[in-house]
Image: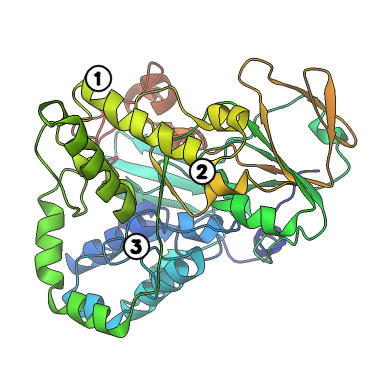
Amino acid sequence: MIQQSPQESAARTTARPAETGTFDAVVIGAGFAGMYMLHRLRGLGFTARVYEAGGGVGGTWYWNRYPGARCDVESLQYSFSFSEELDQDWSWSEKYSPQPEILAYANHVADRFDLRSQIVFNTRVIAATFDEQAGSWLIETDRGDRVSAKFCIMAVGCLSAPNRPAFTGMADFRGPIYHTGEWPHEGVDFTGLRVGVIGTGSSAIQSIPIIAQQASELTVFQRTATWSVPAWNEQLSPEYLREAKAHYPELRAKARARPTGFYFQFNAQPALQASEDERERLYEEAWQRGGLPFLGAFGDLLFEKAANDTIADFAREKIRGIVKDPATAELLCPRNVFGCKRLCVDTNYFETYNLPHVKLVDVSTTPIERFTTEGIVVDGTEYKFDAIVSATGFAAMTGSFDKIAITGRGGQTLADNWGAGPRAYLGLASEGFPNLF
């Protein structure tokens, strides 16, 4: 049975009067983007309303509460940069902040800038329709709200609509099925349980080492191996924080000058012009620093296939050196371009497969056949579980838009307009949908 957070279902039964009225702007979503949008709109003198499906601010960090959830960009940079005072009065505890701390930060921002008064929680927008005569958008919610606004701003996130593969027989499984993107707020205790995890993407890479500490047996079903680099996470000392805060403006300026939006050590030298010994030395130094900046070891890694092959070979050798079983190690070695798909950051992910109660099952050529009352069948073999974790990610980029009936000029829907894939001018606006951003 698929588990939902009881807080969400309870919150939606709470009665409140349906809202009507007119605003300059309606923002959909109260994650980091929606919160900042509200702050800016209000500062410019616009009237605004924010609708949020969850029971609080934070977006990704409100919903994703699975074991081990944390940011993969360093805390000091994974934060709002619009207020120097905010930079100074908030102190991060770790190099890579865990989910509870990031959510606490989001709540701190909402309180510090008095954002909650204009956010309606536990309310999902179901439709946005452009009124051509009035030149405004009609916004409708699942709580009966009907408001109009000149501007409609979609802050729904590109990784926020959980992807739930419809495996045959899922309803037959007697135990709980959890999705990492909709984790119960009260947490889950896997102590002594036989657990199956489907997927080896970012959320799986973070949660598998934690679940393995509790479960009596852990079986991971992998379709595609994922590149991951060690985080080397650590506590931030008071001395380090004082020094960092003293130079925060310079850090923000450097971050804005990077294509990634965050600052990291970058070597512009081409890998193909370096000797093999020099490449190995710089790759090892970057590996020991850890994190996403590993890709900054050389300047041509994402532009020259031959250069990329050198960093991919280095990372594969690292995996083979960590994972003791050669067959398992080879399954965990990706065959795609390094950094083309999302690069992950981990703590003891590959080491986890050395534990005697952890097993990796390849489903790339023999997919999951079906669920049973007791587990999952792959290639004729039934794996029995007490609980299953679906770490199957999100309907990326457009999944959250697909949940809202968005209709522009002439009755054209955004879903039809994006039938061949999303297209937007500067990533902000599409023809036929005036003032929808």
Q: Is residue 425 left or right of residue 121?
A: left
Q: In terms of depth relative to the viewer, which is nearer, 93 or 106?
A: 93
Question: Which quadrant holds the C terminus?
Answer: top left
Which residue does the numbered mark 2 point to in the structure image?
322
Q: How many marks?
A: 3
Image position of 101 (left or right of 186): left
Q: Image point 29% across, 40% down: which residue?
A: 436
Mark 1 sits on what residue? 305
Dot placed on the residue nearer the N-terminal end, 2 or 3: 3
N-terminal of the two: label 3 or label 1? 3
Residue found at x 38% / y 53%: 72
* As drawn, 186 above or below 226: below
Identified by mark 1, the residue type is: Lys
Query: Residue 2 at what x, y percent from top left?
Result: 75, 44
Picture quarter containing residue 416?
Answer: top left
Q: Quadrant of residue 421?
A: top left
Q: Earlier in the sequence, mark 1 or mark 2?
A: 1
Residue 142 makes an appearance in the image: no
CA gap, disc 2 and disc 3: 42 Å
Residue type of the residue flagged with mark 3: Met
Q: What residue is pinned by disc 3?
A: 35
Which of 86 and 421 lies nearest the eye of the viewer? 86
Q: Is residue 395 above or below residue 261?
A: above
Secondary structure, mark 1, is: helix
